[in-house]
Amino acid sequence: MNYSITTLPQIFLNSHHEKIEDHIGWIEPCGLVYLKTMKHGGVDISNIKASNDVVSYVRTIQSTQSGTGKSYVPYRNFNTNTNINTIAYEITAQIVGKLDLAPENMEDFKNYINYAVSEVMQNVLDHSGSACGGHVVGQSYPQKGKVQFAVSDCGVGLMATLQNEYGVRSEREAILKALEPQVSGSVVIGPYGEKRNAGIGLFALKCIIDETKGQLLIISNDTIYTRHNGKESFEHVPESRFCGTLVAFELSEHNTDYYFEEFKKMHIWSAVNKTDEEEFF
């Protein structure tokens, strides 16, 4: 089985087993963080075998301290002591730098990805309650002109994060609610009830995915959500052994039509504020 952004929903359907047996012929960042989260959750993955190429790739991407000059971002574990913005900037510049883009397009593509990665990583730290911190991996595919990033944690999931404030009753409802603008499970950090973010992280990522014709995958405990070409689908495994949240997305530079500043005006600022006045960012 290939552990890719398109096949992970099918793999997830077997996530109720205490021991997983499989043979991996190909693995993408989403597959790597998925297995790490399963392992942290106590699932026995020792019976999973892999091709020599996969074994070599996984060992390299986990052991290399720097991927400078490479098409991948080495696996990183991050926690509350991590500077999210610094990591997001470094890994974005490294990944996008491998693509054959004009300077002005490269900068815009970097902005799209940097924003998406930093928001997802910050969400993990803000309200996942993850004892293992977060996992992040990235990979560029220069020949296909696309990049994939995956972030996961072994925390409480989206329903537990949002149920008190929004009354969601399932992970499916929580995922859909999290994709709306101005929805946040972040902790209050100020004397007047301010939250760390404006609740636009996953909403903005959804907009980016739709505009770039990319792919989005979200797992929250027993439910997996996919989005591609504006179409979404769910899979539910009541006895899933996956515990936590995973967000993976894939973007193609060939389909990035808007300048990042224009994108913010058209989708983020207008959706959050219902106006075309001064930019939010």
Image (cartoon, helix red, strand yellow):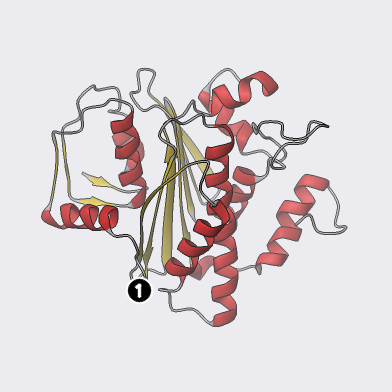
The quadrant of the rendering that contains the N terminus is top left
Viewed as shown, does residue 271 lie left or right of 93? right
Viewed as shown, does residue 147 lie left or right of 125? left
Badge 1: residue crowd in 10 Å (few <14, some 14–19, many ≥20): few
The quadrant of the rendering that contains the C terminus is bottom right
Q: Is residue 5 above or below residue 64?
A: above
Q: Of residues 234 and 90, which is closer to you in this image?
A: 90
Q: Is residue 161 above or below residue 178?
A: above
Residue drawn at x 44%, y 38% is: 133
Percent position (x, y) of residue 213?
A: 52, 58
Q: How many marks?
A: 1
The answer to whether residue 212 is seen in the rendering is no
Percent position (x, y) of residue 17?
A: 24, 22
Residue drawn at x 46%, y 29% is: 155
The part of the image, by quadrant, that contains residue 185 is top right
Is disc 1 placed on a helix, strand or loop? loop
Percent position (x, y) of residue 64?
A: 28, 60
Q: Is residue 51 above or below residue 69?
A: above
State the residue lying farthest toward the front. Answer: 81
The part of the image, by quadrant, that contains residue 165 is top right
The answer to whether residue 132 is seen in the rendering is yes
Q: Of residues 86 and 153, which is closer to you in this image?
A: 86
Residue that badge 1 annotates: 69
Residue drawn at x 54%, y 74% is: 106
Q: Amino acid at mark 1?
A: Gly
